[in-house]
Image: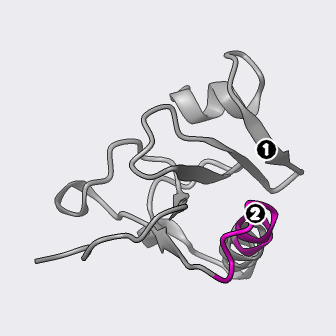
Amino acid sequence: MNNIFNKIINHKIKSNILYQDNIVTAFKDKNPQAPIHILIVSNKLIPTMNELKNEKDKMIIGHMLIIAVKLAKKQKIEKSGYRLIINCNKNAGQEIYHLHIHLLGGKKLGKIIN
């Protein structure tokens, strides 16, 4: 699948990449919902959390979480607080079917649900 995340991962379109290795790519969200809004994306195309099938895939999500924490520290929000969000499918608000984590922070965040 040639979605926007694949294009960013493969440097086919310009993005503000903050971190990249052979497992994940992290970049600033183009339409931030908080002062700090970073997307941590699996380099491997995994459409949703439901498609995590084997031990290797489980290692990917673990690595994504570790990188999210490192980025929170780099952004100096680890003590004030931050939110990690993974949306899974339409009713949860997933728009791009490529596994990713939203890292949000930089201000007091409101309730996620009412």
Residue 71: image tag: 2
Mark yes or no: residue 1 visible: no
Query: Which residue is outermost to the right?
Result: 21
Real-space CA distance between mark 2 and mark 1, rounded to the nearest whole angstrom: 8 Å
x and y percent of residue 15 in the render?
68, 26
**In the displayed structure, would residue 102 be above or below residue 49?**
above
Here the colouring is: one colour
Mark yes or no: residue 60 visible: yes
Report helix, strand or loop for mark 1: strand
User: 94 or 81: nearer the eye?
Assistant: 81
x and y percent of residue 67 in the render?
77, 67
Residue 18: image tag: 1
User: 85 or 56: nearer the eye?
Assistant: 85
**In the displayed structure, would residue 112 be above or below residue 97?**
below
Residue 102: image tag: none
Are circles 2 and 1 on residues that touch, CB within 8 Å? yes
Residue occupying image coordinates x 28% and y 72%: 110
Within 10 Å of disc 1 (Cα), the crowding (few <14, some 14-19, many 20+) is: few
Sequence-earlier tag: 2 or 1: 1
Within 10 Å of disc 2 (Cα), the crowding (few <14, some 14-19, many 20+) is: some
Report helix, strand or loop for mark 2: helix
Residue occupying image coordinates x 77% and y 22%: 11
Quadrant for the C terminus, please: bottom left
Q: Which residues are magenta?
A: 69-79
Q: Is residue 76 on the magenta stretch?
A: yes
Residue occupying image coordinates x 24% and y 63%: 92
Query: Which residue is outermost to the left?
Result: 114
Residue type highlighted by circle 1: Leu
**In the displayed structure, would residue 52 be above or below residue 40?**
below
Residue type highlighted by circle 2: Leu
User: 112 or 8: nearer the eye?
Assistant: 112
